[in-house]
Amino acid sequence: MRARSSFVRCALAVASVLALCACDDPKPGAAAAEAPTDRAEVVMANKKQTTFADLCDVAPGKDAPKTFSWPAMSAAAPSSSAKYRWVNVWATWCKPCVEEMPLLSRVFADWRKQGNDVTLTLVSVDAEASAVQGFMTAHPGTPSSLQVSDGSQTTPWLTGLGLPTGSSIPVHMVVDAAGNLLCARSGGIAQEDLDRFRRVMFP
């Protein structure tokens, strides 16, 4: 009896395996529908192009369009006819701001040399102008910087542009020639981030 029972269990197991294999068999014509070429075309069709909305905390298409505005500053912002103005909000006491400054200086100089129409404008939120001047002296080659006239107005300025309350510097913004805010993002930036921005700004 035990031998017969074992035989029955083995027979059932073999039947189950065969049934599973049969489910995996393609139906007639299925091979053509799943051709590698067709799958590649579907992937390419669904591939999403990176936009400002993918890279920024605030951007058109993600938020209502905004017009860029300057805070009260110790000097007027220089005019620019470039396609884009990149605004970097920073401070000498902000470690990530200072660490990324050489990268920003180099990358934007390279972009301009390669014919990409963009200007870099620094805006310091330091309380003392002497701190900014001392930083520039200690780091020759750093682009000149504007300075807010009242640091306490920095948060209202940034939140007015759509950034969440409590956003930390550095803050990076992209403004077009018409004065439209295309991007605002809080936090440090790396080379790979700038590479992605370049593909969006200069496709």
Image: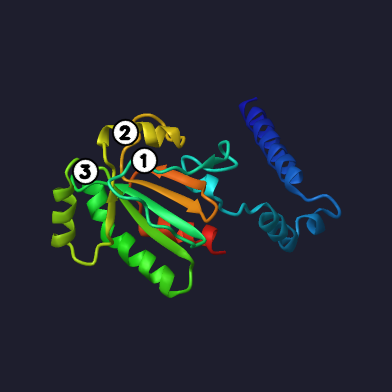
Circle 2 sits on which residue?
153
Q: Residue at x 36, y 69 (%)?
A: 109
Residue closest to the eye, 62 or 128: 128
Query: Between disc 2 and disc 1, whose residue precedes?
Result: 1
Q: Are marks 2 and 1 in contact (CB under 8 Å)?
A: yes
Query: What amino acid is labelled 1 in the image?
Result: Pro
User: Helix, strand or loop at disc 3?
Assistant: loop
Q: Are marks 2 and 3 in contact (CB under 8 Å)?
A: no
User: Helix, strand or loop at disc 1?
Assistant: loop
Q: How is the image coloured?
A: rainbow
Query: Between disc 2 and disc 3, whose residue precedes?
Result: 3
Q: Quadrant of residue 119?
A: bottom left
Please give left or right for residue 130 compared with residue 68 in the image.
Answer: left
Could you say where residue 16 lies in the image, as x and y percent from the top left? 70, 37
Could you say where residue 35 lies in the image, as x and y percent from the top left? 75, 60
Q: Specify few, some or many for label 3: CA neighbours under 10 Å numbering under 14, 14-19, or 20 or more.
A: some
Could you say where residue 29 lies in the image, as x and y percent from the top left? 85, 55
Quadrant in which the N terminus is drawn: top right
Please give left or right for residue 181 compared with residue 91 in the image.
Answer: right
Query: Between disc 3 and disc 1, whose residue precedes?
Result: 1
Give the total number of marks visible in the rendering. 3
Query: What amino acid is labelled 3 in the image?
Result: Asp
Q: Gap in Å between the C-alphas at discs 3 and 1?
A: 13 Å
Circle 3 sits on which residue?
126
Q: Specify few, some or many for label 1: CA neighbours under 10 Å numbering under 14, 14-19, or 20 or more.
A: some
Please give left or right for residue 68 compared with residue 96 in the image.
Answer: right
Circle 1 sits on which residue?
71
